[in-house]
Amino acid sequence: MNNFKLKDLTLISALAGIVAVSGLTIQEAHSQGTSTIKVDGSSTVFPITEAAAEEFQKSTKGAVRVTVGVSGTGGGFKKFCRGETDIANASRPILAKEMEACKAAGISYIELPVAYDALTVVVNPQNSWAKNLTVAELKKIWSPEAQGKVTNWNQVRTGFPNAPLALYGPGANSGTFDYFTEAINGKAKASRTDFNASEDDNVLVQGVSKNKNALGYFGYAYYEPNKTRLRAVAINGPKGAVLPSATAVINGTYQPLSRPLFIYVSAKAAKRPEVKKFVTFYLTNGAKLASSVKYVPLPAAAYKTVMGHFQKPRLGTVFGGQEAVGLTISELLKRDAK
Amino acid sequence: MKSESAKDVHKLIAWAKLWQAGFIILGVLSLLVGIVTLVALLADMFIKGGPLISWRFFTSFPSRNAEEAGILSAWVGSLLVMFVTALAAIPLGIASGIYLEEYARKNWIADLIEINVANLAGVPSIIYGLLALGLFVYAFHLGDTVLTAGLTLAILVLPVVIVTTREAIRAVPSSIREASYALGSSKWQTIRSHVLPYGMGGILTGVIVALSRAIGETAPLITIGALTFIAFLPDSPVQSQFPYISFAWLMSPFTVLPIQMFNWVSRPQPEFQLNAAAAGVVLVGMTLLVNGLAIYLRYQFRKGIKW
């Protein structure tokens, strides 16, 4: 019986020992662990930052760790303004509410555009009529007033066939939805709600590719690999019908559906050598990285200007908390921080 | 007259047989619906993902190029998270089960706890994710780390372990307990030397069911912020310097197999769908391995029992 007690005692003391040691080492690890750069935010910007993180970690042979999370632009800014992350991925400029949160927490930031995205309106390849659409026609289709009323292609433009209109678009939590509704309907999040919504763009690709009468919209990165299953619709502007493409985005003719993508670097984190190195790597290789994941890179000169903004830290945002629609790259870079 | 009633009986038997045959067909069809669907899904996954599984797939980090992408950080993460989950859920669950079954007085508090535990086993996993987000990430500041994930999954599977432990203990005949008491042993000695060893087979089954559930969970981990690109391994638990063991890996960011699959499935390039299928094959393999281990252990325990 004594024997049993002894065994129990050793077991308990061994457990206590393990707990104590683990407690100590956890504290130690905090102070001396490998340096980690934390990035979080938009799923649209994710592929570019992921590419940068992948190549950067290869080039430093694992000396620096980079984690890239996906919690949406809004979620990313929440964590960023609480000081939990070093860099925020954003598919739209920081909003007034988020600016206040950051200010309250004493977090200042450097706003860096890294690439452009062309929101692409797509139809089924068998759709022989809708080669191009005007912004007004898109508004007729997507505005909140169209709910339950605009349900046939022949209501969109005279001459379009009598065919039911099947709509596909991203869900309300998406930055793409915010931007599209702002650009087309004039107010972010104002949209009809009787369409097939999904946060997963692959579902939209599937939907449009299987329905002859479908129309949908999402980021160019999802259109590019699915070109055989979908057809992009040209946007009719003052300079004629323009299809989404890198050239059209850079020369500013694909309007109003091209949008800049950003990373926001915390000014405090930017002082750390590994963060400095990572952002410099990101901007130097920005063009290559962006095009490798099917986004539109900024012109080389623009990356230089942006690099200047990072090296001589230009704090704050140039948008003053407003969503910016129809801004060309050169206009964007000329703006001053507010 | 006699032959008439015999005819009736024959007719009755024929009807009964017909009903029986009908029911057998219905049963087999019902079974087939489930099995065929399962087999078709598994076969589809194996055909798509099987050819991609190679040494390289296990030893490469995720990448934006589908051909280069692998699951190194994912399977290591899955193993580490499972380790923490097992370490937290098994002792807690078994101890709670023993207490509730053997020590707790049977009153309304015990009833209340019993109802709650049974209900908790059926709560959707995302709720546990929200609980973990509030408790571990915000209140304890543990961040989105291996430790948080392990503990989250531990509380998720705790009710399953408790319920099965209680059932396993209850199945031990009371004559065994009485015999033990008759020989003068205390309650704890009885539990330790008789109830626990005899119930171990059932307890292990519960533990394994729990761990198999935990290994495939995605929703609660996404809630705590684990949907992340990770191309590095957590710190090694074994160090070359004193004290030789390090627990830094507990505080490391992580990814797990189901999250890696989720990430790949949502990508535009079709090649990534194949990668996701391959990761699925590995996940199914891991689950089967855990289950196999459990069956083996249970067999070993049952072999040792001589009543």
Image (cartoon, coloured by chain):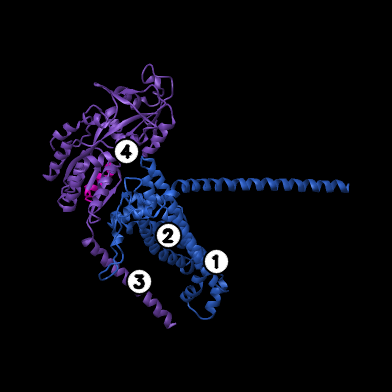
Which residue ends up furthest to the right in the rendered image? Answer: B1
Q: Are marks 3 and 1 in contact (CB under 8 Å)?
A: no
Residue underneath mark 1: B171
Label 1's element? Answer: loop
Which residue is at the front of the view, B26 or A122? Answer: A122
Inspect the image, locate mark 4, and give the three-letter code of the amino acid beneath it: Ser
Q: Quadrant of residue A25?
A: bottom left
Dot 1, crowdedness within 10 Å: few (<14), some or many (≥20)? Answer: few
Kindly report the distance in space between the C-alpha atoms of the residues bearing marks 3 and 2. 20 Å
Is tag 4's residue or tag 3's residue first in the polypeptide sequence?
A: 3
Chain letter corresponding to the colour purple: A
What residue do we see at 20% from left, 49% from top?
A: A278
Q: Chain of mark 1?
A: B
Inspect the image, locate mark 3, and give the three-letter code of the amino acid beneath it: Leu
Dot 4, crowdedness within 10 Å: few (<14), some or many (≥20)? Answer: many
**Would residue B232 appear left or right of B276 to someone viewing this image?**
left
Confirm whether circles 1 and 2 share one chain: yes
Q: Chain of mark 2?
A: B
Q: Position of residue A189 (x, y in %)?
A: 30, 33
